[in-house]
Amino acid sequence: MSWVANAVAGCRLKDQRLKPRLERILERLSAKPTARIPAACQGWGETQATYRFLSNERVEAEEILEGHSQATIKRIAAEPVALLVQDTTFLEYIKDVVGKGVGTLRETSREEHLLHPSVAFTPGRVNLGVLTHQFWQRPEEPVGHLRAQRPIAEKESYRWLLGYGVAGEVQRRCPETLVVSVADRAGDIHEWFLAAAQRAAEEQAAFVIRATCNRRVAAQPQDTYLWEALREAPVLGQTTVEVAEQAGRTARQARLTVRTGAVTFNRGRRRGGHLPPVRVQAVYAKEDSPPPGEDP
Ligand SMILES: [Mn+2]
Protein backbone atom coordinates (compact mmCIF):
# COMPACT_ATOMS: atom_id res chain seq x y z
CA MET A 1 0.00 0.00 0.00
CA SER A 2 1.25 3.53 -0.78
CA TRP A 3 1.74 5.82 2.22
CA VAL A 4 -1.19 7.92 1.05
CA ALA A 5 -3.57 4.95 0.88
CA ASN A 6 -2.26 3.89 4.28
CA ALA A 7 -2.83 7.36 5.73
CA VAL A 8 -6.38 7.58 4.41
CA ALA A 9 -7.43 4.02 5.32
CA GLY A 10 -7.76 4.90 9.02
CA CYS A 11 -9.77 8.10 8.47
CA ARG A 12 -13.34 8.08 9.68
CA LEU A 13 -14.89 10.77 7.50
CA LYS A 14 -18.59 11.40 8.09
CA ASP A 15 -19.04 10.90 4.34
CA GLN A 16 -16.87 7.91 3.45
CA ARG A 17 -17.38 8.62 -0.25
CA LEU A 18 -14.93 11.51 0.16
CA LYS A 19 -12.01 9.17 0.87
CA PRO A 20 -10.87 8.75 -2.76
CA ARG A 21 -10.93 12.55 -3.07
CA LEU A 22 -8.80 12.95 0.07
CA GLU A 23 -6.38 10.36 -1.29
CA ARG A 24 -6.05 12.25 -4.57
CA ILE A 25 -5.53 15.59 -2.78
CA LEU A 26 -2.79 14.13 -0.58
CA GLU A 27 -1.05 12.66 -3.62
CA ARG A 28 -1.11 15.96 -5.48
CA LEU A 29 -0.11 18.24 -2.57
CA SER A 30 2.65 15.92 -1.33
CA ALA A 31 4.13 15.74 -4.84
CA LYS A 32 4.33 19.57 -4.94
CA PRO A 33 4.23 20.70 -1.32
CA THR A 34 5.17 24.31 -2.03
CA ALA A 35 2.82 24.83 -4.98
CA ARG A 36 -0.48 26.66 -4.83
CA ILE A 37 -3.53 24.41 -5.12
CA PRO A 38 -4.22 25.06 -8.84
CA ALA A 39 -0.56 24.35 -9.69
CA ALA A 40 -0.48 21.14 -7.63
CA CYS A 41 -3.74 19.79 -9.03
CA GLN A 42 -4.04 18.45 -12.56
CA GLY A 43 -6.67 20.49 -14.34
CA TRP A 44 -9.46 22.83 -13.38
CA GLY A 45 -11.93 20.06 -12.48
CA GLU A 46 -9.54 18.62 -9.93
CA THR A 47 -8.73 22.07 -8.58
CA GLN A 48 -12.42 22.82 -8.03
CA ALA A 49 -12.98 19.43 -6.40
CA THR A 50 -10.10 20.19 -4.01
CA TYR A 51 -11.58 23.56 -3.07
CA ARG A 52 -14.97 21.90 -2.54
CA PHE A 53 -13.40 19.31 -0.25
CA LEU A 54 -11.49 21.92 1.76
CA SER A 55 -14.57 24.10 2.26
CA ASN A 56 -16.85 21.17 3.10
CA GLU A 57 -18.32 21.98 6.50
CA ARG A 58 -18.71 18.29 7.31
CA VAL A 59 -14.98 17.52 7.01
CA GLU A 60 -12.97 18.29 10.14
CA ALA A 61 -9.20 18.73 10.26
CA GLU A 62 -9.05 16.03 12.97
CA GLU A 63 -10.74 13.54 10.64
CA ILE A 64 -8.20 14.20 7.90
CA LEU A 65 -5.28 13.74 10.30
CA GLU A 66 -6.63 10.71 12.14
CA GLY A 67 -5.65 8.04 9.61
CA HIS A 68 -2.18 9.49 9.19
CA SER A 69 -1.72 9.63 12.98
CA GLN A 70 -2.71 5.97 13.32
CA ALA A 71 -0.21 5.01 10.62
CA THR A 72 2.44 7.15 12.34
CA ILE A 73 1.90 5.35 15.67
CA LYS A 74 2.46 2.02 13.89
CA ARG A 75 5.75 3.34 12.50
CA ILE A 76 6.78 4.58 15.96
CA ALA A 77 6.02 1.17 17.48
CA ALA A 78 8.62 -0.38 15.14
CA GLU A 79 11.41 2.00 16.30
CA PRO A 80 13.54 1.63 19.45
CA VAL A 81 13.51 5.43 19.99
CA ALA A 82 11.08 8.06 18.69
CA LEU A 83 11.42 11.82 19.17
CA LEU A 84 8.09 13.66 19.35
CA VAL A 85 8.98 17.24 18.52
CA GLN A 86 6.45 19.97 19.23
CA ASP A 87 6.63 23.63 18.31
CA THR A 88 4.43 26.58 17.41
CA THR A 89 4.37 28.03 13.94
CA PHE A 90 2.54 31.17 12.81
CA LEU A 91 0.32 31.14 9.72
CA GLU A 92 -0.55 34.50 8.31
CA TYR A 93 -3.28 35.10 5.79
CA ILE A 94 -3.49 38.40 4.01
CA LYS A 95 -6.88 39.05 2.48
CA ASP A 96 -7.89 41.82 0.13
CA VAL A 97 -10.67 43.71 1.81
CA VAL A 98 -11.53 45.92 -1.13
CA GLY A 99 -13.21 44.10 -3.98
CA LYS A 100 -11.83 43.89 -7.48
CA GLY A 101 -12.78 46.55 -9.99
CA VAL A 102 -12.47 49.51 -7.67
CA GLY A 103 -9.32 50.93 -9.16
CA THR A 104 -5.89 50.74 -7.55
CA LEU A 105 -7.12 50.95 -3.98
CA ARG A 106 -5.64 48.12 -1.96
CA GLU A 107 -6.58 47.45 1.61
CA THR A 108 -5.81 44.18 3.33
CA SER A 109 -6.70 42.47 6.58
CA ARG A 110 -4.27 40.23 8.42
CA GLU A 111 -5.45 37.05 10.01
CA GLU A 112 -2.99 35.14 12.11
CA HIS A 113 -3.43 31.55 13.18
CA LEU A 114 -1.14 29.51 15.37
CA LEU A 115 -0.40 25.89 14.65
CA HIS A 116 1.22 23.64 17.26
CA PRO A 117 1.88 20.17 15.86
CA SER A 118 3.68 17.14 17.30
CA VAL A 119 5.87 15.53 14.63
CA ALA A 120 7.65 12.20 15.15
CA PHE A 121 11.25 11.57 14.07
CA THR A 122 13.83 8.84 14.53
CA PRO A 123 17.11 9.97 16.14
CA GLY A 124 18.57 9.61 12.59
CA ARG A 125 16.13 12.36 11.49
CA VAL A 126 13.69 10.22 9.50
CA ASN A 127 10.24 11.83 9.67
CA LEU A 128 7.72 9.25 10.88
CA GLY A 129 4.70 11.51 10.55
CA VAL A 130 2.46 14.04 12.29
CA LEU A 131 0.59 12.99 15.42
CA THR A 132 -1.63 15.87 16.40
CA HIS A 133 -2.09 19.51 15.72
CA GLN A 134 -3.55 22.28 17.81
CA PHE A 135 -4.84 25.17 15.79
CA TRP A 136 -6.03 28.42 17.29
CA GLN A 137 -6.24 32.15 17.00
CA ARG A 138 -4.86 34.46 19.65
CA PRO A 139 -7.46 36.27 21.70
CA GLU A 140 -6.88 39.95 22.35
CA GLU A 141 -3.75 40.06 24.48
CA PRO A 142 -4.25 41.46 27.94
CA VAL A 143 -1.49 43.76 29.15
CA GLY A 144 1.66 42.21 30.59
CA HIS A 145 0.98 42.10 34.31
CA LEU A 146 -2.50 40.62 33.85
CA ARG A 147 -1.08 37.98 31.57
CA ALA A 148 1.31 36.66 34.21
CA GLN A 149 -1.60 36.19 36.61
CA ARG A 150 -3.69 33.94 34.40
CA PRO A 151 -3.69 30.26 35.35
CA ILE A 152 -1.73 27.96 33.05
CA ALA A 153 -4.73 26.53 31.17
CA GLU A 154 -5.56 29.97 29.80
CA LYS A 155 -2.04 30.64 28.66
CA GLU A 156 -0.39 29.46 25.52
CA SER A 157 2.06 27.45 27.59
CA TYR A 158 -0.79 24.98 28.06
CA ARG A 159 -0.13 23.80 24.47
CA TRP A 160 3.13 22.29 25.61
CA LEU A 161 1.44 20.28 28.33
CA LEU A 162 -1.11 18.98 25.83
CA GLY A 163 1.79 18.04 23.55
CA TYR A 164 3.45 16.14 26.39
CA GLY A 165 0.13 14.39 27.02
CA VAL A 166 0.19 13.21 23.40
CA ALA A 167 3.68 11.77 23.94
CA GLY A 168 2.41 9.94 27.04
CA GLU A 169 -0.44 8.44 25.06
CA VAL A 170 1.98 7.29 22.35
CA GLN A 171 4.26 5.79 25.02
CA ARG A 172 1.33 3.81 26.43
CA ARG A 173 0.48 2.48 22.97
CA CYS A 174 4.12 1.74 22.04
CA PRO A 175 5.58 0.16 25.20
CA GLU A 176 8.63 -1.21 23.33
CA THR A 177 9.68 2.25 22.11
CA LEU A 178 11.44 4.94 24.12
CA VAL A 179 9.23 7.96 23.40
CA VAL A 180 10.95 11.33 23.95
CA SER A 181 8.98 14.58 23.90
CA VAL A 182 11.21 17.41 22.61
CA ALA A 183 10.70 21.15 23.00
CA ASP A 184 12.58 24.41 22.64
CA ARG A 185 12.82 27.04 25.38
CA ALA A 186 9.11 27.87 25.29
CA GLY A 187 8.49 24.42 26.81
CA ASP A 188 10.60 25.07 29.92
CA ILE A 189 7.69 25.31 32.36
CA HIS A 190 7.45 23.95 35.90
CA GLU A 191 4.01 22.46 35.22
CA TRP A 192 5.51 20.19 32.54
CA PHE A 193 8.00 18.65 34.97
CA LEU A 194 5.24 18.11 37.52
CA ALA A 195 2.93 16.56 34.91
CA ALA A 196 5.71 14.15 33.92
CA ALA A 197 6.44 13.16 37.51
CA GLN A 198 2.75 12.58 38.25
CA ARG A 199 1.94 10.36 35.28
CA ALA A 200 1.48 6.60 35.58
CA ALA A 201 4.68 4.74 34.65
CA GLU A 202 3.29 3.21 31.44
CA GLU A 203 2.46 6.62 30.01
CA GLN A 204 5.45 8.53 31.30
CA ALA A 205 7.21 9.67 28.14
CA ALA A 206 10.78 10.95 28.47
CA PHE A 207 11.45 14.58 27.62
CA VAL A 208 14.24 16.85 26.44
CA ILE A 209 13.47 20.55 26.90
CA ARG A 210 15.92 23.33 26.24
CA ALA A 211 16.34 25.39 29.42
CA THR A 212 15.25 28.99 29.20
CA CYS A 213 16.34 30.32 32.56
CA ASN A 214 18.91 29.67 35.24
CA ARG A 215 16.49 28.25 37.79
CA ARG A 216 17.15 28.02 41.48
CA VAL A 217 17.90 24.48 42.56
CA ALA A 218 17.96 22.97 46.02
CA ALA A 219 21.48 22.17 47.28
CA GLN A 220 23.46 21.73 50.50
CA PRO A 221 24.59 23.76 52.36
CA GLN A 222 22.58 26.39 50.45
CA ASP A 223 20.49 26.69 47.28
CA THR A 224 22.28 27.44 44.05
CA TYR A 225 21.43 27.94 40.35
CA LEU A 226 21.13 25.39 37.55
CA TRP A 227 24.26 26.30 35.55
CA GLU A 228 26.39 26.46 38.71
CA ALA A 229 25.07 23.11 39.94
CA LEU A 230 25.92 21.42 36.64
CA ARG A 231 29.39 22.86 36.13
CA GLU A 232 30.78 20.24 38.51
CA ALA A 233 28.45 17.40 37.44
CA PRO A 234 29.91 14.12 36.12
CA VAL A 235 31.06 14.17 32.47
CA LEU A 236 29.14 11.92 30.06
CA GLY A 237 31.52 12.55 27.17
CA GLN A 238 32.37 14.89 24.32
CA THR A 239 30.45 15.67 21.16
CA THR A 240 30.91 17.98 18.19
CA VAL A 241 28.20 20.23 16.76
CA GLU A 242 28.07 22.48 13.72
CA VAL A 243 27.71 26.14 14.65
CA ALA A 244 26.01 28.04 11.84
CA GLU A 245 27.28 31.34 10.50
CA GLN A 246 25.64 34.45 11.93
CA ALA A 247 26.21 38.18 11.77
CA GLY A 248 29.61 38.64 13.42
CA ARG A 249 30.30 34.91 13.67
CA THR A 250 31.84 32.52 11.17
CA ALA A 251 30.66 28.92 10.95
CA ARG A 252 32.70 26.45 12.98
CA GLN A 253 32.64 23.08 14.63
CA ALA A 254 32.30 23.29 18.39
CA ARG A 255 33.59 20.58 20.68
CA LEU A 256 31.24 20.24 23.63
CA THR A 257 31.67 18.57 26.99
CA VAL A 258 28.38 17.02 28.09
CA ARG A 259 27.60 16.69 31.79
CA THR A 260 24.53 15.41 33.57
CA GLY A 261 23.12 15.43 37.05
CA ALA A 262 19.83 15.20 38.92
CA VAL A 263 18.63 18.52 40.31
CA THR A 264 15.60 19.65 42.29
CA PHE A 265 13.90 22.77 40.98
CA ASN A 266 12.56 24.83 43.86
CA ARG A 267 8.84 25.37 44.16
CA GLY A 268 7.35 27.60 41.47
CA ARG A 269 5.49 30.78 42.40
CA ARG A 270 2.00 31.05 40.94
CA ARG A 271 -1.06 33.15 41.68
CA GLY A 272 -2.80 31.73 44.75
CA GLY A 273 0.09 29.61 45.97
CA HIS A 274 3.14 27.59 45.03
CA LEU A 275 3.81 24.61 42.83
CA PRO A 276 5.74 21.86 44.64
CA PRO A 277 9.48 21.36 43.98
CA VAL A 278 10.28 18.78 41.32
CA ARG A 279 13.33 16.64 40.57
CA VAL A 280 14.61 16.37 36.97
CA GLN A 281 17.65 15.05 35.16
CA ALA A 282 19.58 17.95 33.67
CA VAL A 283 22.06 17.84 30.78
CA TYR A 284 24.70 20.55 30.39
CA ALA A 285 26.61 20.92 27.11
CA LYS A 286 29.35 23.53 26.96
CA GLU A 287 32.09 24.42 24.51
CA ASP A 288 35.24 24.39 26.68
CA SER A 289 37.62 26.21 24.37
CA PRO A 290 35.89 28.54 21.88
CA PRO A 291 38.15 30.36 19.38
CA PRO A 292 39.73 33.54 20.82
CA GLY A 293 37.19 36.36 20.98
CA GLU A 294 34.15 34.10 20.42
CA ASP A 295 31.46 33.33 22.96
CA PRO A 296 31.17 29.64 23.81
MN1 LIG B 1 9.52 27.55 19.15
Image (spheres, rainbow, N blue to C red):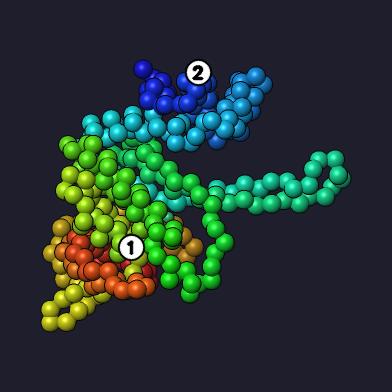
Amino acid type at circle 1 is: Ile
Residue drawn at 30 percent across, 34 percent down: 73
Q: Residue at x 20, y 43 (%)?
A: 178
Using residue 155 as the reference point, say whether residue 270 is left or right of it: left
Coordinates of residue 52 in the picture (x, y in percent)? 61, 27
242 shown above or below 64: below
User: Disc 2 or 1, which lies upstream in sequence?
Assistant: 2
**In the rendered view, does 67 fall on the left or right side of 31?**
left
Q: Is mark 1 within 8 Å of ligand 1?
A: no
Return the residue at label 1: 189
Q: Determine the residue positioned at 21% across, 49% down.
A: 204
Which percent across, then down, holds residue 53? Answer: 57, 27
Say which of 158 and 32 sits in front. Answer: 158
Q: Which residue is mark 2?
A: 17
Question: For ligand 1, which image quadrant applies?
Answer: bottom left
Q: Spatial distance from mark 2 to mark 1, Cα to Cα?
A: 44 Å
Could one spot residue 172 in this view of the protein? yes
Label 1: which secondary element: loop
The amino acid marked with disc number 2 is Arg
Judge by depth and name the residue closer to the eye, 48 or 227: 48
Quarter that holds the N terminus: top left
The secondary element bearing badge 2 is classed as helix
Q: Is residue 239 above or below residue 273?
A: above
**Location of the C terminus (image quadrant):** bottom left
Residue depth check, mark 2 versus mark 1: number of the one nearer the observer: 2
Residue 38, placed above or below residue 254: above
Circle 2 residues within 10 Å: few <14, some 14–19, many ≥20: few
Residue ID at (35%, 50%): 162
Q: How many marks?
A: 2
